Image: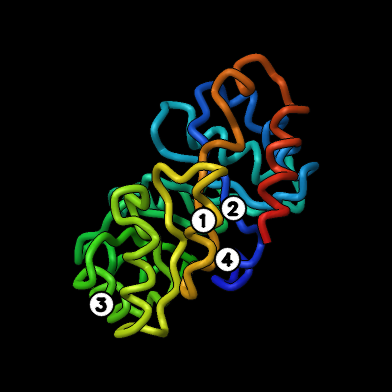
Amino acid sequence: MTPTETVLDRSPVIPVVTVEDPGRAVPLAEALLAGGVGIVELTLRTPGALAAVRAVARGVPGMLVGVGTVLTPRQADDAVEAGADFLVTPGTTPGLLRHLARSGITALPGVATVSEVLAARDEGFLAQKAFPASVLGPGFLRAVAGPVPDVVFCPTGGITADSAPDYLAAPNAACVGGSWLTPPDAVRDGDWERVTRLAAGAAALR
């Protein structure tokens, strides 16, 4: 199991990537790593997502591989079997929270309200994903920091290179999630130099 602190400290930005072609997963991950970003979240939004996870987990040493858009306990188990180092959910249910807590895998459960923050905290999750961040805003993080100072967040959803510093400035933002590091056209065209440049810019945010 990868410690939560390692996941949160790996990069100021966790790239959130939806891979259409699993064959592009390894060069994409290598391009991110070349730019100084040694972590990636591959979402379960395409039929080849788990194949992409397996390829990166086996083929890119030094890259922490997360699996996002985990909606069910079965998906969580499949992701771990594929080689995931950590899991990310867009939201949580009591059953999913309990399953993640019992599994021992590092996970960032998704939350959007203070009640959800407390429910995840009760299950032992002191690191959570604030989603959708562009709706919640950095003010949400600052407001939660007062009554719940022991929980940190990875705000994700609609964050851009321009808005990321506002979120990272919140006292309880450990990192942010963002998709701008891997533009769909760059991935489609195999423009890995562009991905590396964007990764380098993200790595320099802190």
Residue underneath mark 4: 8
> 51 above or below 13?
above
Q: Camera-side residue: 94 or 133?
A: 133
Residue 130: where, in percent of width, then height?
36, 59
- Residue 13 is tagged as 2
Q: Nearer the viewer, mark 1 or mark 3?
A: 1
Which residue in the structure is indicated by mark 1? 176
In this rendered view, identify the residue nearer to me: 152 or 72: 152
Q: Amino acid at mark 4?
A: Leu
Please tell me whether residue 189 is drawn above or below residue 15 in the rendered image: above
Q: Residue at x 37, y 79 (%)?
A: 145
* Residue displayed at 66% across by 48% down: 202
- The tag earlier along the polypeptide, 4 or 2, is 4
Residue 45: percent from the left, percent from the top?
39, 33
The answer to whether any part of residue 102 appears in the image is no
Q: What SS does tag 1 mark?
A: strand
Determine whether label 3 and label 4 are within 8 Å by CB: no
Q: CA distance from mark 4 to mark 2?
A: 9 Å
In which quadrant will I find the C terminus? bottom right
Of circles 4 and 2, the one toward us is 2
Secondary element type, mark 4: helix
Write down the residue under mark 3: 118
